[in-house]
């Protein structure tokens, strides 16, 4: 009986953390959905709202490491200068974990459907942090 009571009490203590994690998961998925919509409407600047507006932002891609929000935005604009090169974006989330409070780790697949210039795609790993009560991508490794 004591063991059952202990299990019930521990479960009740874990509920707030589980509900917070569920809310955080929904918040991150909503940001990714908004990013997809912004990309597919040709709004690169709005797509970047999911990223940390800091010189400490890191983006690791096929050509190396980019540091900073403005440099990352400039790279997106350079690599995707028009709607044909941007295509239609689709994300598939493969894994999401919360290894620490206010930290999330997301693994996924991205795909651009681009009839005029050829499709592109790959995988990404995103490290998120909750900064001032808002989830932002602090490191993106996309290939």
Image (cartoon, rainbow, N blue to C red):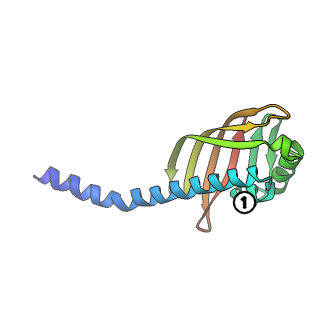
Residue beneath the point at 22% across and 52% down: 7
Q: Is residue 57 visible?
A: no
Q: Is residue 110 visible?
A: yes
Residue 19 horizontal/vertical position (percent): 41, 59
Residue beneath the point at 74% across and 37% down: 113
Q: Which residue is mark 1?
A: 49
Position of 13 compared to 139: left or right?
left
Residue beneath the point at 63% across and 48% down: 127
Locate the C terminus and report the quarter of the image it occupies.
Answer: top right
- Residue 12: image quadrant is bottom left
Instruction: Point out the residue furthest to the front here.
Output: 115
Q: Nearer the viewer, residue 79 or 117?
A: 117
Q: Nearer the viewer, residue 45 or 2?
A: 45
Position of 115 compared to 125: left or right?
right
Residue 43 horizontal/vertical position (percent): 79, 56
Q: Is residue 96 above or below residue 117?
A: below
Q: How many C-alpha atoms fall within 10 Å of the one at disc 1: few (<14), some, or many (≥20)?
A: some
Q: Nearer the viewer, residue 5 or 126?
A: 126
- Residue 10: image quadrant is bottom left
Instruction: Point out the residue furthest to the bottom here.
Output: 132
Position of 75 compared to 110: left or right?
right
Circle 1: element type: helix
Residue 108 horizontal/vertical position (percent): 61, 39
Q: Is residue 20 above or below residue 97?
A: below
**Number of labelled discs?**
1
Residue 84 horizontal/vertical position (percent): 85, 42
């Amino acid at each position: 009986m004591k063991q059952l009571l202990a299990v019930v009490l521990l479960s009740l203590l874990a509920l707030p953390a589980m509900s917070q994690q569920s809310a955080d998961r929904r918040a991150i998925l909503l940001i990714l959905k908004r990013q997809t919509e912004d990309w597919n409407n040709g709004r690169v600047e709005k797509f970047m709202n999911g990223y940390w507006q800091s010189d400490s932002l890191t983006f690791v891609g096929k050509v190396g490491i980019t540091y900073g929000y403005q440099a990352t935005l400039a790279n997106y604009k350079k690599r995707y200068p028009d709607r044909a090169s941007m295509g239609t974006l689709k994300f598939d989330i493969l894994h999401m974990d919360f290894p620490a409070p206010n930290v999330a780790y997301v693994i996924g697949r991205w795909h651009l459907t681009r009839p005029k210039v050829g499709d592109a795609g790959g995988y990404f790993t995103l490290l998120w942090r909750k900064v001032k009560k808002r989830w932002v991508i602090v490191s993106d490794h996309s290939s």
